[in-house]
């Protein structure tokens, strides 16, 4: 077994590193590529949600008859607000980011769907636009659910892209939303991997769900689709050890050039066969046609030939002290964006939350 060389994520407690900052720390910048106004609006919508991630709790508590009734109601409301599948688990402090204080007992994990017919265009803006839309929808869903819980007299905090204080994947797995795929994303038999996560933490007592074993890990052990199609050879053929667990992990340094140069890439999700089985085979024909149309070697070579030059769009850091990855800046027009967030002009609550997460202004 090899050991992942990424101290922020491999230590006893994971430190928060904003996704776009991860690739910037290797010298690439996803924001160097201009995106459409529609895609940028989805990006901005994730910040709008932050205005209501927390709020006042109603004085009068509306009690449930029991924890089962509470869970059923919360899942029903989550579906109304936009979650295609919801799971509940206990907050595991092991997976709360280092330096964060999250006193809530329960985590409600929300799966927000993505359309495979948009996801199948990996390494293009069409793909990333669908991803940004899902994250914006996830933020809105989490905020609406948190507001509902607070209206019943219980504290609740919404978590979404760039504003999560806990690691979502291990909580989603514990909540029964799926298993970790070889490509590093969650896979659900019903949904494939065409969904994104959001979360609400609360002290509302609820019946919790259990992890599931749907045979996904066995399939991933024998399926090489994402490995063969990954242009950066970033998907390993064996599991690695992290904090005592053996799990699939991505070679971040090999992934970064493609993630940063091509709209967060997503080819591994595009070619995952579970998307053909998902939603009762809704996308099976579309998936098969897409796979047949791809020459993986030809596409990989084309992408390799047009990669960004390392540090072309990113300022090389002078020091690598604690938290340095979150401080790496882009050059030129991208310099105003720090992890996708303008350095000024947003409501103070957004910068306040980023302060709590250890993100610089």
Image (cartoon, grey):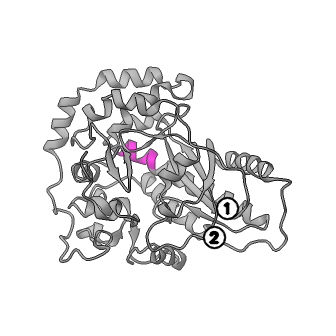
Residue at (61, 59) in percent of width and height? 200
Residue at (27, 36) in percent of width and height? 237
Q: Which residue is mark 2?
A: 54
On the rendered image, what quadrant is the C terminus found in?
bottom left
**In terms of depth relative to the viewer, which is nearer, 303 or 188?**
188
Magenta segment includes 305: no
* Secondary structure found at label 2: loop
Q: Position of residue 57 (x, y in %)?
A: 74, 72
| Above or below, comparing residue 214 to residue 258 in the picture | above
Q: Which residue is mark 1?
A: 146
Q: Are marks 2 and 1 in contact (CB under 8 Å)?
A: yes
Q: Position of residue 329 (x, y in %)?
A: 27, 71
Magenta segment includes 128: yes
Residue at (14, 56) in percent of width and height? 309
**In terms of depth relative to the viewer, which is nearer, 165 or 9?**
9
Left or right position of 58 against 352:
right
The answer for how far apart the CA atoms under marks 2 and 1 are is 8 Å
Q: Position of residue 124 (x, y in %)?
A: 32, 43
Residue 165 visible to the viewer: yes
Q: Quadrant of residue 27?
A: bottom left
Q: Position of residue 5 (x, y in %)?
A: 24, 57
On the rendered image, what quadrant is the N terminus found in?
top left
Residue at (40, 64) in percent of width and height? 14
Q: Which residues are magenta?
A: 125-131
């Amino acid at each position: 077994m090899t050991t992942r060389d990424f101290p922020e994520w491999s230590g006893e407690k994971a430190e928060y590193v904003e996704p776009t900052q991860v690739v910037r720390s290797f010298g690439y910048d996803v924001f160097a590529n201009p995106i459409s106004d529609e895609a940028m609006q989805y990006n901005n919508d994730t910040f709008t949600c932050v205005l209501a991630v927390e709020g006042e709790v109603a004085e009068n508590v509306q009690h449930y008859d029991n924890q089962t009734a509470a869970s059923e109601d919360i899942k029903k409301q989550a579906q109304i607000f936009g979650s295609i599948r919801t799971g509940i688990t206990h907050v595991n402090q092991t997976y709360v980011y280092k330096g964060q204080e999250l006193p809530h007992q329960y985590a409600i994990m929300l799966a927000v769907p993505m359309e495979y017919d948009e996801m199948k265009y990996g390494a293009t803006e069409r793909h990333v636009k669908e991803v940004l839309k899902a994250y914006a929808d996830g933020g809105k869903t989490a905020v609406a659910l948190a507001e509902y819980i607070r209206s019943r007299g219980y504290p609740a905090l919404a978590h979404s892209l760039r504003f999560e204080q806990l690691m979502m994947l291990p909580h989603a797995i514990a909540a029964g939303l799926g298993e970790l795929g070889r490509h590093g994303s969650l896979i659900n038999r019903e949904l494939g991997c065409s969904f994104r996560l959001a979360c609400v933490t609360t002290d509302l007592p609820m019946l919790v769900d259990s992890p599931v074993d749907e045979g996904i890990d066995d399939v991933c052990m024998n399926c090489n689709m994402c490995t063969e199609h990954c242009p950066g050879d970033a998907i390993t053929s064996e599991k690695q050890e992290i904090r005592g667990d053996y799990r699939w992990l991505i070679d971040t340094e090999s992934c970064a050039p493609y993630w940063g140069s091509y709209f967060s890439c997503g080819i591994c999700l595009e070619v995952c066969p579970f998307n053909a089985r998902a939603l009762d085979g809704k996308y099976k024909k579309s998936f098969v046609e897409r796979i047949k149309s791809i020459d993986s070697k030809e596409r990989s070579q084309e992408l390799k030939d047009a990669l960004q030059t390392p540090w072309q769009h990113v300022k090389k850091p002078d020091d690598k002290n604690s938290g340095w990855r979150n401080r790496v800046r882009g050059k030129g027009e991208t310099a105003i964006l720090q992890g996708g967030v303008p350095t000024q002009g947003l409501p103070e609550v957004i910068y306040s939350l980023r302060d709590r997460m250890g993100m610089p202004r």
